[in-house]
Image: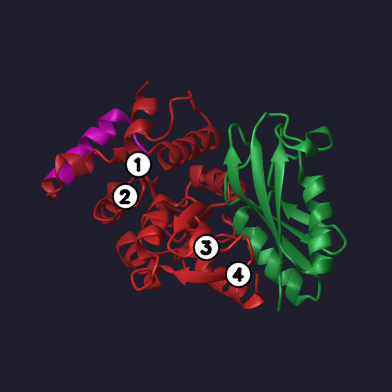
Amino acid sequence: MITTDQDILASAEAWKRAGRKVAVATVVETWGSAPRPVGSRLVVDEEGNFLGSVSGGCVEGAVVTEALDVIEGGAPKLLSFGVADETAWRVGLSCGGRISVFVERVEG
Amino acid sequence: MKLDLLAELNAERAARRATVVVTDLATGAQRLVKEAAVAADPLSETLAAAIRSGKSGMAETAEGPRFLAVQTPPLRILCLGAVHISQALVPIAGVLGHDVIVVDPRTAFATSERFPGVQVLAEWPDEALPRLGVDRYTAFVALTHDPKIDDPGLHIALRSDCFYIGALGSRKTHGRRVERLTEAGFAPEAVARIRAPIGLPIGAVSPAEIALSIMGEITAALRLGERTAATTAAA
């Protein structure tokens, strides 16, 4: 079953209410050719389970890792991925674009 | 993101109302602005423009740079006619993340056995549609092939600001439909909103292929806008 952006936020709420620790990642800016539009979301729990996408699969792994950090520490993070970034050697967008992803913990 | 805000966001979406979440990316501080509260908000102009465009993005505001996450209601397809094509349309629309409601006054057609997991209303369109609300996040599809059922539905759709109106039938059938609608007092520009013959020209034959061509046309209307999509369809 393919999840839509709607299902993702509903899942984030359901996961949190079920006692899981949850972070939400959102694409906040894109430059050039980017696989997912601004506003696309990914929800992650403390075990690394995730729903949704912020790219076509290129940087999800790295976002999930950072999200686990945010779940642990609580402070939000603004991540940047792309060819112009030093992380390009590790994780980058093969399409040549750049994206910014905001990761925040669900508090409550 | 606070759980309360997340819950409110989900509730607003379920109620088919637009919202904007305003976030300061430096601190994570955020607030949710409901569509009805936009006019009274300090950032009213920026927020109203964001909702109109339906696009999320960064904005320079009087409060500093903010990320505006726009949430518009899920697209809804009002399918008049619980017919074979509708049965194929439901799962395709589902994969695309759209809600589908099937309306057909013929009780033999409008059964949940034929449409498992979908809202099916065995009602006349002039009863069901005003209650459901035909808004600008709605696509209306008339598929019964029966003017007694299709026409009252088209009347309501033409008076609404729904983003897509399509009606099944050949050019000849549509010609007669145009005559009836004109007689009923609809202006040529209004009648021209109806996509007929319905669907993108992909040579569709089976009900599933016709459903695919309709979903393609609805997607084009959504992403390219009404005029461009019409040109694409004609090409």
Callout in the foreground (4, 1) = 4
| Between marks 4 and 3 in the image, the one whose residue lies nearer the viewer | 4
| Chain A as rendered: colour | green
**Span highlighted in magenta in the image:** B165-182
**Disc 4 with disc 1 on a shared chain:** yes
The residues tagged by marks 3 and 2 sit, at their Cα atoms, a distance apart of: 19 Å
Residue that mark 3 sits on: B119
Which of pointers 3 and 2 indicates the residue nearer the eye? 3
Residue B181 within the magenta-colored segment of the rendering: yes
Give how far apart the Cα atoms at labels 4 and 1 are: 47 Å
> Is mark 4 in CB contact (under 8 Å) with mark 2?
no
Compute the Cα span from label 4 to label 3. 39 Å
Residue bearing the label numbered 4: B29
Between disc 4 and disc 3, whose residue precedes? Answer: 4
Hey, what amino acid is under mark 2?
Asp
Q: Nearer the viewer, mark 1 or mark 2?
A: 1
Vertical order, B35 against B211 (above or below): below
Q: Specify the principal SS of the magenta part.
A: helix
Instruction: Say yes or no: labels 4 and 3 on the same chain.
Output: yes
Q: Which residue is mark 1?
A: B167
Question: Are the residues under marks 3 and 1 on the same chain?
Answer: yes
- The C terminus of chain B - image quarter: top left
Q: Where does residue B183 sit, x and y in percent of width and height?
A: 11, 46
Q: CA distance from mark 4 to mark 2?
A: 50 Å
Q: Residues within 10 Å of mark 4 (few under 14, many from 20)?
A: few
